Amino acid sequence: TTLWNLRTGEVTTRPDVYHADEANGRGWTVGRSRAGPVLSSGTRSVVLPPAEGTRTGGPTEVFEVISLSDDGRTIAGYQDAAEGKLVVVAVRWRCS
């Protein structure tokens, strides 16, 4: 993922995130990595753990991040249910 700061013209590349679903005013992104959902700030990335009742990994994993708060502490979306059926559940990650 490449982030372009329109105020400064600075371009930052985040090779660990291959698709960003959302970004906030701080330039943090949340999206997809090879390991699953990932939150990426300007200096580091954190793979989001599976939410309770969901699964991660595998070629058929389904997840979508649809919201990232301005402070980067709340992320919401949906993810595969643990049963492996074609069922998705709403998820929310809260970071401290």
Image (cartoon, helix red, strand yellow):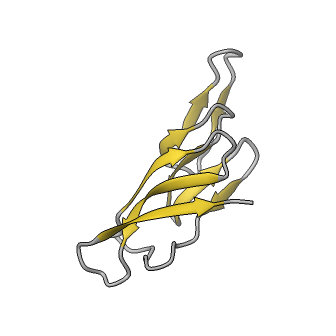
Residue furthest to the left: 86
Name which quarter of the figure residue 84 lies in.
Answer: bottom left
- The image shows residue 10, relative to residue 19, as above or below, that is above
The C terminus lies in quadrant: bottom right
**Which of 42 and 34 lies nearest the eye of the viewer?**
42
Task: Please report the residue visible at 32 percent of the width from the left and 84 percent of the height from the top.
Answer: 83
Name which quarter of the figure residue 95 lies in.
Answer: bottom right
Horizontal and vertical percent position of residue 91 = 46, 64
Q: Is residue 19 visible?
A: no
Name which quarter of the figure residue 29 lies in.
Answer: top right
- The image shows residue 7, relative to residue 69, as above or below, that is above
**Which of 27 and 44 lies nearest the eye of the viewer?**
27
**Which of 78 and 13 lies nearest the eye of the viewer?**
78
Q: Is residue 59 visible?
A: yes
- The image shows residue 23, relative to residue 73, as above or below, that is above
Horizontal and vertical percent position of residue 93 = 58, 62
Residue furthest to the bottom: 83
Task: Please report the residue visible at 66 percent of the width from the left and 33 percent of the height from the top.
Answer: 12
Q: Indicate left or right for 10 with 93 as reference.
A: right
Q: Indicate left or right for 26 with 83 as reference.
A: right
Task: Please report the residue visible at 38 percent of the width from the left and 81 percent of the height from the top.
Answer: 82
Horizontal and vertical percent position of residue 94 = 63, 60
